[in-house]
Amino acid sequence: MVKTDFNKKVEIIATEICEAFTIRLRSDGILHSHTTSSINFNVESLKKFNVVMGRMLNYKKAPLLITFDEFAIPPVETRDFWAKKESCPYSSADAYITATLGHKLMGNIYLQFNKPERPTKLFTKQEDAIDWLKTFL
């Protein structure tokens, strides 16, 4: 019988700030991106994000946990860009935390109209998102 320690604490291995994004590599192999509402971002910002993400992951894929400040809303052109598989070659799956009604509505629009080309789900609880993302490790 294999003993698993479910109470093992996850540590942050690396952190980088790239414009509106704070990117953290977790010890469980999940990358966490948090978007601030205090800095606007665009497609060029996401391209810079990808450079940082690739470097942090040693150019391998990992599941991506995505959170936003309450008033951080991705512009339309960034949603169109991010939905394409080739726009983020290092993400194996995207889990969005929808902490507000606005984020939930925006997330549902993203899923229905932008139709992301990699596995993508919305979650209200971070623990549920992490459990789902671990299936992509």
Image: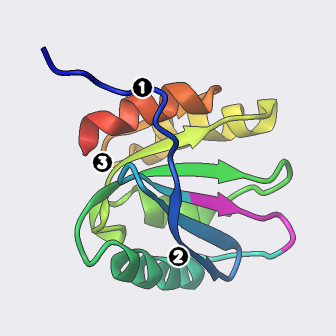
Rendering coords of residue 42 (x, y %): 63, 77
Residue nearer the viewer, 31 or 50: 31
Name the N-terminal-most of marks 2 and 1: 1
Residue 103, percent from left and from top: 72, 39
Q: Which mark is residue 46?
A: 2
Question: Closer to us: mark 1 or mark 3?
Answer: 1
Q: x%, y% of residue 75?
A: 68, 63
Q: In this picture, is 88 found above or below 58?
A: above
Circle 3: element type: loop
In the rendered structure, which amino acid carries the disc numbered 2? Leu
- Give me the C-alpha separation between circle 2 and circle 3: 16 Å
Q: Please state if 102 lies on the left or on the right of 22 as rendered.
A: right
Q: Residue at x 30, y 48 (%)?
A: 118
Residue type at the position of mark 3: Arg
Q: Nearer the viewer, residue 88 or 76?
A: 88
Q: Amino acid at mark 1?
A: Phe
Part of the protein shown in magenta: 33-38
Q: Is residue 87 above or below residue 17?
A: above
Q: Which residue is under mark 1?
A: 6
Q: Which mark is residue 67?
A: none
Cα separation, mark 2 vs mark 1, equals 34 Å
Residue denoted by label 3: 118
**Which of pointers 2 and 3 lies earlier in the amino acid sequence?**
2
